[in-house]
């Protein structure tokens, strides 16, 4: 049975499911947020208005993702490539969705470097196609 605590985040489910699939049996926990701790560092190496460059801990990450799901609904996440490292994984993937305020399509590519400790995510470093995000977020509403 899905955790009701995560119901708010359903618009990002394709992303969370893809990440959880990529992590496989390297971590404990059924949902993305189950493998995040209060010490996890989630770092993004791009500028998006309203999204901090560094987020520390599960509660703060959940708060930021609350804003994400109020703005974007994902329909899918795909093209997953997983590269194992000595202390984690590197994943490449794409997400596809809609900007809720405008109805504009949102398609983006990511590369995330994930370091694990004690079967949880210790550090997440994220790269994305910033131009794709900018174009989707600044596009005019569909007519």
Image (cartoon, helix red, strand yellow):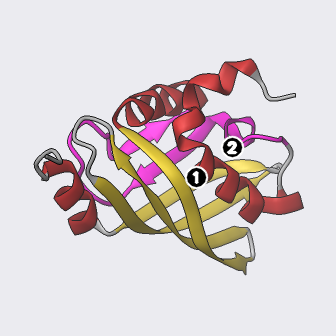
For marks 2 and 1 on the same chain, the one whose residue lies earlier in the sequence: 1
Q: Answer with left or right where residue 86 lies relative to residue 72.
A: right
Q: Secondary structure at mark 1?
A: helix
Q: Which mark is residue 121?
A: none
Q: Residue at x 53, y 29 (%)?
A: 62
- Quadrant of the frame with the N terminus: top right
Q: Quadrant of residue 132?
A: bottom left
Residue at point 76%, 60% (across, down)? 21
Mark 2 vs 1: CB contact within 8 A: yes
Q: Residue 139 at x, y = what percent? A: 13, 53
User: In terms of depth relative to the viewer, which is nearer, 124 or 72?
Assistant: 72
- Residue 76 coordinates in the image, percent (x, y): 55, 57
Q: Residue furthest front?
A: 143
Q: Secondary structure at mark 2?
A: helix
Q: How many C-alpha atoms fall within 10 Å of the one at disc 2: few (<14), some, or many (≥20)?
A: many
Q: Determine the residue positioned at 66% across, 26% down.
A: 6
Residue 39 seen in render: yes
Q: In front of the other: label 2 or label 1?
A: 1
Label 1 packing within 10 angstroms: few (<14), some (14-19), many (20+): many
Indicate whether residue 108 is drawn in magenta. Answer: no
> Residue 10 is drawn in which quadrant?
top right
Which residue shows up at 27% across the image and 44% down it?
103
Q: How many marks?
A: 2
| Farthest top residue in view | 4
The answer to whether residue 132 is above or below residue 27 is below
Tell me where the magenta segment starts and ends, as one range: 29-57
Q: Is residue 43 above or below residue 29?
A: below
In the picture, measured across the screen, residue 132 lies left or right of residue 32, that is left
Q: Which mark is residue 15?
A: 1
Q: Which mark is residue 32?
A: 2
Depth order, front residue of 14/49:
14
């Amino acid at each position: 049975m899905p955790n009701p605590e995560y119901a708010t985040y359903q618009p990002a489910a394709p992303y969370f499911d893809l990440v959880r699939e990529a992590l496989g049996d390297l971590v404990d926990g059924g949902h993305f947020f189950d493998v995040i701790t209060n010490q996890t560092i989630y770092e993004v190496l791009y500028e998006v208005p309203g999204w901090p460059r560094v987020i520390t801990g599960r509660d703060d990450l959940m708060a930021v993702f609350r804003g994400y799901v109020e703005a974007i609904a994902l329909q899918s996440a795909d093209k997953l490539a997983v590269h194992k490292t000595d202390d984690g994984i590197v994943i490449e993937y794409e997400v596809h969705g809609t900007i809720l305020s405008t109805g504009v399509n949102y398609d983006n590519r990511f590369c995330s470097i994930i370091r694990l400790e004690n079967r949880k995510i210790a550090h997440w470093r994220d790269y994305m196609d910033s131009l794709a995000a900018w174009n989707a977020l600044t596009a005019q509403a569909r007519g």
